[in-house]
Amino acid sequence: MSSRTSALYISHIEVVWLLYRRPLMPREISHILIGAVYHPPKADNRLMLDHLISSMDTISRQHPQTGIILLGDFNQLPEGQLRTYPLKQLVSRPTRMQSILDKIYTNVANWFEAPVILPGVTKSDHESVLLTPSICPQRPRRQMIQLHRRSSEPSRKTLLCDYLRHFNWTPLSALNNCAAMVDNFYSIILTALDYYLPTVTVIKCSTDKPWVTPSFRNLVKSRQRAFFAGDLASYHRLRYRTQRMANKLRKNYFETKVEQLHTWWTRTKCLLKLPDSNPFDANLDCQDSPDKLAETINNFLPARRLC
């Protein structure tokens, strides 16, 4: 099912966006964003590139695993920002005289065959470009990766905290110098960590989503076993639990990432001694000319340099 993303519509920019989603999607992506572009020869390159990049960013923030297909008549639009997005340009043969004006950019290039150039439609002086899906797309090879990390069981963490709370730290003060104190302190801590939170080996698949945990993987295995055993009652119950846990893990993962970014910016402002209400943001007018914007930024930064 596809829907037009009217929120990305801008009247003076000739781009139509479609967001495509099937009930069952490949593991690599959750949605496909299709952008049909016409960039006139004398149009503003910066305005078009800003719109394309910001629109793709908007959808990618809502759906992080989005496949992108950007196609149309780009004329002389510089493609550096699109290639570093990163998108790959698939059309390699001229589509009008000796120029490649009609292009296809995508981040799922392995899903498609090389585009075929066909005669133009009706009286168009542009050739047609036919893009067909690959019968056997080259998907990333699944590899089992061994990760070594400390146990994170809540009960073990509680025991560690209790041990450190009641540990007798008095002998540290009897040591002769600071270096000996530090060495002894680290020895005590590392010994306690190795005992209460030992290093465990976790097997992870290279194609797993970053929020997948061992408990979630075990739940999926239980669901699959119930399905192949014909136990439909258990299968439906485990399927519901799997979906609920997946939604919770995914939400917590992305909320944590956003919170980390917020914390990073808060600490950066503290380091730069910026006030909570940043006067730079208040003075920045996106309607200003590029020269005026550059002057505003230049006047602001020298006073905020790190010592």
Image (spheres, rainbow, N blue to C red):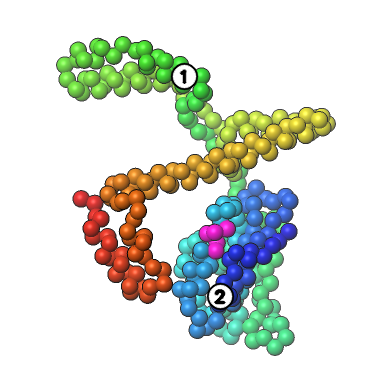
Mostly what secondary structure, the magenta segment?
A: helix
Residue at the far left in the pictured view: 176
Query: Residue 220, position in %: x, y?
Result: 68, 34
The answer to which of 3 and 105 lies nearer the viewer is 3
> What's under tag 1, amino acid-wise?
Thr
The residue at 50%/81% (across/down) is: 43
Is residue 69 among the parts visible in the rendering?
no
Q: Any mark on residue 13, and which? A: 2
Magenta highlight on residue 95: no
Check disc 1 and report the residue beneath it.
158
Magenta-tinted stretch: 55-59
Q: Is residue 173 left or right of residue 276?
A: left
Dot 1: within a 10 Å radius of its alpha carbon, few (fewer than 14), some, or many (20 or more) residues?
Answer: few
Q: Position of residue 200 (x, y in %)?
A: 50, 25
Q: Is residue 40 above or below residue 158?
A: below
Q: Secondary structure at mark 1?
A: helix
Residue under the image location 33 percent in, 73 percent down: 292
> Residue at horizontal 48%, vertical 44%?
257
In this picture, residue 233 sits left or right of residue 143? right
Instruction: Say which residue appears at 55% left-offset and 77% top-offset.
Output: 12
Q: Which kind of residue does numbered mark 2 sit on?
A: Ile
Q: Nearer the viewer, residue 30 or 229?
A: 30
